[in-house]
Image (spheres, helix red, strand yellow):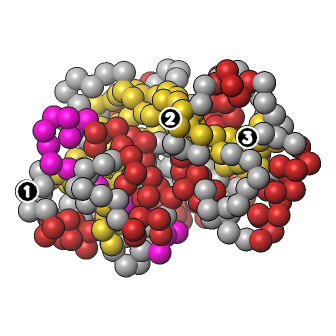
Amino acid sequence: MTRQDFINRHLLNRSILSIILYPISVINQTIQKFRRDWYHHHQSKKADVKIISIGNITAGGSGKTPFTIWLARHLKQQGKKIAVSHRGYKGDFENNNTLISDRENILSTARKAGDEAQLLAEKLPGIPVCAGKDRWISIQMLCEAYPDLDMIILDDSFQHLKVKHDIDIVIFKTANPVGNGFLLPAGILREPLSAINDADLIIFNGEGEIPQSFQKYDKTIRQGNYRVEGIYLNNQSIIEVSELKSKKLGVISGIADPLSLEKTISNLNLEWQFHLKFPDHYHFAKDSDIRLIKNQIESSQIKFILTTEKDYTKLKHLDLSVPIAVIRIEFYLTDISDLL
């Protein structure tokens, strides 16, 4: 059983296993509720600039980083001076907060900061990005370097309660947004749904109807989706979809929702010979991984590898025998009126 099969069978739907694990999820729910209530009654650290937190209450990818990129660009276009903080998950600076881009350049530290932090630095030229899980240190570093900042966006920070958030934005997938309704480890929820009461804005990511059950929280709700901005050969020069249709293609990904990538490729009317699915944020650093990829390329006789921008930050360092075609996607909102 693949990881995605496990999630579909036991976490997105109720099964014997999820019911067995339910008592543990109740304990987790109690802990998470107590933790949030505790911070409601104790002072969080207040920054000198407005803090916008983007997060979710579900495990796995909901689109936080693509939305962060969209929001940072949107605010910059409005004339705001913006910076971004990211945890730098699985990067070298997760425990040692480091500036990875400034208003002029992407710094050499970016390539060691983790895939999503590096992607933010690359996609947001002119906007400083700091990596590190201690958000207060990142805020202090950014404010010291750029005292004219209007706002700092904290990517993946809804559960980081030590810092006061001026605006909390919570993102859900439109499709099956809360899974089977249980908390981890019996479901996909990180916190009980009551945590939505702390949100100022809810973003639904994807096509379909927004569940009516969310209306009871009386929150501003907006809906967005992804669109393909283009496919780029080695993430540099654009390559037309028509050029790929007659070629044998392979797919490699290390993302939370590999099925969403397959859907994107299918919507482009492209077919693939194989899809090597690795865990989210995977480094592709083991010799066995490299052998697996190279053997799959050779046996399938493919001409291109298709992958995401996030995965390309790591795959580009491998010595592969075929070029990599990077699918660039961008998030957009259908309604931006009175957004913030």
x, y (%) of residue 288?
A: 81, 68
Query: Pointer 1: what residue?
Result: 148
Amino acid type for the residue under numbered disc 2: Ile
Residue at left 63%, top 36%? Answer: 260
Q: Picture coordinates of residue 304 (x, y %)?
A: 73, 40
Q: Which residue is mark 2?
A: 329
- What residue would you read off at disc 3? 304
Report the side of 190 relative to 244 (left or right). left
Tell me the crowding category of disc 1: few under 14, some 14 to 19, or many 20 or more residues within 10 angstroms, Cα based: few
Which residue sits furthest bottom? Answer: 96
Q: Amino acid at mark 1?
A: Asp
In the image, taking residue 34 as reference, residue 185 lies left or right, namely: right
Residue 30 visible in the displayed image: no
Amino acid type, callout 3: Phe
Disc 2 vs disc 3: which is toward the camera? Answer: 3
At mark 2, the secondary structure is strand
Asked if residue 260 lies in the magenta stretch, the reply is: no
Residue bounds of the magenta highlight: 74-92
Which mark sits nearer the N-terminus, 3 or 1? 1
The x, y position of residue 226, in whole percent, is 49, 30
